[in-house]
Amino acid sequence: MPNQSSFPTPFSDNAVAVLGLGPMGRALAGALLAAGHDVTVWNRTPGRDGALLAQGARPAESAAEAVATATTTATATATAASAASSAAAAGSPLVLLCVRDQSAARAVLDAAGAALRGRTVVNATSITPEDARANAADARARGFRLLEAAILTPTPTIGRPQGTVLLSGDPEAFTAHEPTLRALGTVRHVGTDPGRAAAFDAALLDLFWTTVHGLVHALALARAEGISGTELTPYAQGLPQLLPPLIEDFARRADERRHPGDHSSLASAEAGLSHVAHTARARGLDTTVLDAALAVTRRAVEAGHGSDGVSGLVELFARQATASSTGPATTGPAAAPSNRRRPAGRPR
């Protein structure tokens, strides 16, 4: 197994291999081309590279060929500059991987094989934190550097400042390739733990998809009561304006482990959720998500925490996570949130 010293010196060069040409992969490759990078592209399903080839991308017949072509291009470019740069460029051209899921990512990495040795791979595939850590261990064993990336914004933002990409893992690899990665938008390294970018992604998608579910469920409930989406819209649009201060307040309370119910309590949340669930159920709508939220809130209230703030549910969820990792999940009063402040880092 290679150690850190066995890797070539990091070098940020102009050549990039992009493996995976779905909508996001094409956006990433297009941004790199627009920034003047020499891009080699490959996709498991042929025929998606037409527009990129017209912009100057090089085609490859396989993942290994794409990596090798980028390496050859990087070496040739650096040779024209200096012999010293050539040795460095041959060591770590950038490989950008963006495919459907973890299974596809591992298949592509396996297909690239020995061509990856000594290279730097940025894996922009949506995966779990556990998958990211497993990928990092595999990269070390196979002799290439790995950065896991979480793309937080849609394809139209890529290549613009609004595009946001979080990366975690090898900090030296990030420093070496940051100038190239900036072509994708705003990039930030969020920690050496390879799973950290994926953890940010999961938490934010948790917020996004539960919010989207709430929206579509609200539209269905409104329709059932004879209210059109157009009629509901101006009132619904006022709700997002409440979120920025709410997010900041809840985040601070979660970090401090303090959840005063000075503005909104769990008891009032239980009453509100119960009312909404009853209304939706009466109209024959699916209330699975509402019922789950109500059950969690009711459990906290029944445990004596009805006067705590709604942010106190963070503690209930966190305690359940801890319990599930050590034994059966706790469902009684011990799982309820506490309004007492705990020192940061104490096991909960």
Image (cartoon, grey):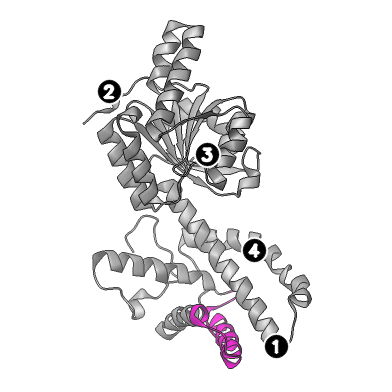
Task: For marks 1 and 3, give the CA distance.
Answer: 46 Å
Tag of residue 6: 2
**Is 65 drawn above or below residue 149 in the view shown?**
above
Tag 3: residue type?
Arg
Q: CA distance from mark 2 to mark 4?
A: 48 Å
Tell me the CA gap for discs 2 and 1: 67 Å
Task: Identify residue type, mark 2.
Answer: Ser
Q: Going 39% across and 53% down the picture, which residue do you hit?
A: 128
Q: Position of residue 86 (x, y in %)?
A: 43, 12
Q: Please tell me which residue is depicted at 53% across the width and 83% down the height of the picture.
A: 286
**Circle 4 is placed at which residue position?**
243
* Residue nearest the viewer, comparing 329 with 180: 180
Q: Is residue 249 left or right of residue 149?
A: right
First to last magenta residue range: 262-290
308 and 284: which is toward the camera:
284
Residue labelled with disc 3: 188
Query: Farthest left residue?
Result: 1
Quadrant of the rendered image containing residue 229: bottom right
Nearer mark to the viewer, of 3 and 2: 2
Nearer the N terminus, badge 2 or badge 4? Answer: 2
